[in-house]
Image: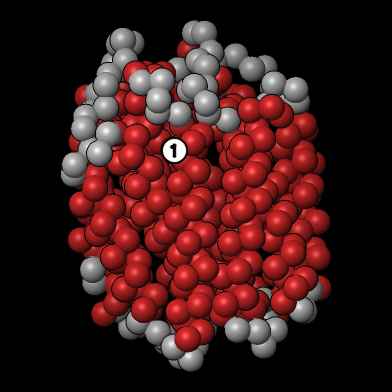
Amino acid sequence: MVPARRLRLLYFLYYASVGTMLPYFAVYLRGLGFDGDAIGTVQMLPALLSPLVALGWAGFADRHGVPTLALRRAALVAAAASLLLPFARTPLAVGAVLLAMALGDRALVPVLDANTVEWSRARPTVVYARVRLFGSLGFSALALAGGAALAARGDRPGDVLVPAVVAACLAAFAAVALTLPAAPGHAEARPAPRELLSLLRHRPLVVLLGACALHWMACAPYHLFFGVLVRDRALPSAVAGIGMTAGVAAEILALLLFPRLGPRFSTRALLVAAFLGSALRWLLLSQATSAAAIVALQLLHGLTFGLFWATAIHALGTLVPARLRATGQALFSAVVFGIGNSLGYRLSGAAYDWHGSAAPLFAWAAGVELVALAVGLALLGRAAPASVSGGPATSAPRGAP
């Protein structure tokens, strides 16, 4: 396979594991007897490691110019640990396995993105947006197939199919990563350690990360308890899979349309649309009771993730120089998916125990989206768009958002 095909397959496999985890893992844990606090805590633990793990692997990739080697090693760590997941049945055991997996999988997305961007610079046929779309396809395929499979198996509590599929996807990811050719290097000099720290002193980048982290924290009830909400409404697991699939279809459409939207609107305007649309989605979802309403509301995922992700990646492309590409992607992952997820998961788990159901969590999420809008974007509107270290802003990769 040429690099583009292998990269597409890697995105498909990774997000296939995510498409299994997000809608069904909390339900699986509840079936094992975990309460809401335990569910939130064990899934918060990997996010706590995310900053160190993502920045560690990305720093290694940037300093030595070996993003492909970093991807291979991180994938092997994640895959090896995931093989233990089907055998973990207590909060302590599940938490330990998820922490071990996090030592590799927290770096997979930023390092894979860095590899894809380098290939897109070297080969016109490798277009970032078109390659990344296969992640969305993998997510929707497994979300839909997983819901159907679990329903066909009787929606049994603690069905081991969930962790087994996650482990299989990560093992296949590692196998493909080992065959990926080394990404071509860029001409810029390797960054010195002090340049890595300069990202943390760049105000526009920090403001962007803060706004995005608040948004992702508001998404935690959806990521953690959407499948539980479906069960709370006395609906089958297949509804969660269909809803996730509808959301991914809207996400793909948003990614395809973004090249036309990006040049016409500012980063601030696009994030306003993403955050306001998400606030409306969470508020309505907290009141929805029918399968049709729940599935229809997932179409707003085009704003919650599609428009949000495309806008954020485009902004990173203008704020972070090429020699710090992997580190910039990792910093985004660490702050948004690490800190944002940690706070969101922990608060969501505690709130689920307090309320005794998932629906009120989505009403709270709508409020957090408005905080992201009022605080983060007010600051972002005043932030200068200069790149890190005073150098010229780098362009987004060909075909990227």
Q: Can residue 197 be seen in this view?
A: no
Quadrant of the rendered structure where residue 296 is? bottom right
Q: Position of residue 119 (x, y in %)?
A: 34, 26
Q: Where is residue 215 in the image (x, y as percent from the top left)?
A: 65, 48
Residue at the spot of label 1: 131
Label 1 secondary element: helix
Question: As displayed, is residue 77 above or below residue 267?
Answer: below
Indicate the colouring scheme.
secondary structure
Amino acid type, residue under disc 1 in the picture: Val
**Badge 1: few (under 14), some or many (20 or more) residues near its Cα, within 10 Å?**
many
54 lies left or right of 290: left
Q: Please state the total of marks drawn on the protein image.
A: 1
Q: Residue at x 77, y 49 (%)?
A: 277
Question: Quick one: 233 or 291, which is closer to the camera?
Answer: 291
Q: Quadrant of the N terminus?
A: top left
Quadrant of the rendered structure where residue 51 is? top left
Q: In which quarter of the image is the C terminus?
A: top right
Q: Can residue 79 be seen in this view?
A: yes
206 lies left or right of 54: right
Question: Quick one: 355 or 359, which is closer to the camera?
Answer: 359
Question: As displayed, is residue 9 above or below residue 269?
Answer: below
Q: Residue at x 45, y 21 (%)?
A: 198
Q: Which residue is drawn at 51% across and 75% down?
A: 147
Q: Which residue is drawn at 26% across and 57% down?
A: 172
Q: Where is residue 272 in the image (x, y as percent from the top left)?
A: 77, 38
Q: Where is residue 3 in the image (x, y as percent from the top left)?
A: 29, 33
131 lies left or right of 23: left
9 lies left or right of 293: left
Question: Quick one: 116 or 197, which is closer to the camera?
Answer: 116
